[in-house]
Amino acid sequence: MSDPTDQTVTPPMQLQYVATDGGAYVIAFPAPKADVPVAEVVPVEVVAVEVTAVLAAAAD
């Protein structure tokens, strides 16, 4: 886990995936600040794992 003294912004991990007509997924979550790029708020690795899990579940 992260250092409890680390005060970096951590958004709620309530990612929502909405399937589009093209089969792509749109990731939406409550961002702490609108001007913060998603890549700086949520590590790309975390998003990639979540998307992979959703795609795998959808393929069943």
Image (cartoon, grey):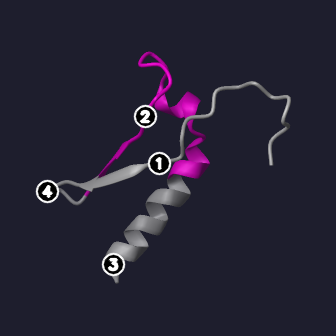
The residue at which mark 3 appears reads as 59
Viewer-side label of 2, 4: 2
Specify the amino acid type for callout 2: Pro
State the separation of the CA atoms marked 2 and 4. Answer: 24 Å
The residue at which mark 2 appears reads as 30
Looking at the image, tell me whether mark 2 or mark 4 is earlier in sequence order. Answer: 4
Residue reaching furthest to the left: 21
The local secondary structure at tag 2 comes to loop
- Does 33 lie within the magenta span? yes
Magenta stretch bounds: 24-47
State the separation of the CA atoms marked 1 and 3. Answer: 22 Å
Specify the amino acid type for callout 4: Asp
Looking at the image, tell me whether mark 1 or mark 4 is earlier in sequence order. Answer: 1
Q: Are marks 2 and 4 in contact (CB under 8 Å)?
A: no
Looking at the image, tell me whether mark 1 or mark 2 is earlier in sequence order. Answer: 1
- Residue 9 in picture, x, y percent from top left: 64, 27
The residue at which mark 4 appears reads as 21
Residue displayed at 62% across by 33% down: 10
Specify the amino acid type for callout 3: Ala
Which of the two residues, 55 or 28, is positioned nearer the viewer here? 28
Q: Which mark is residue 14?
A: 1
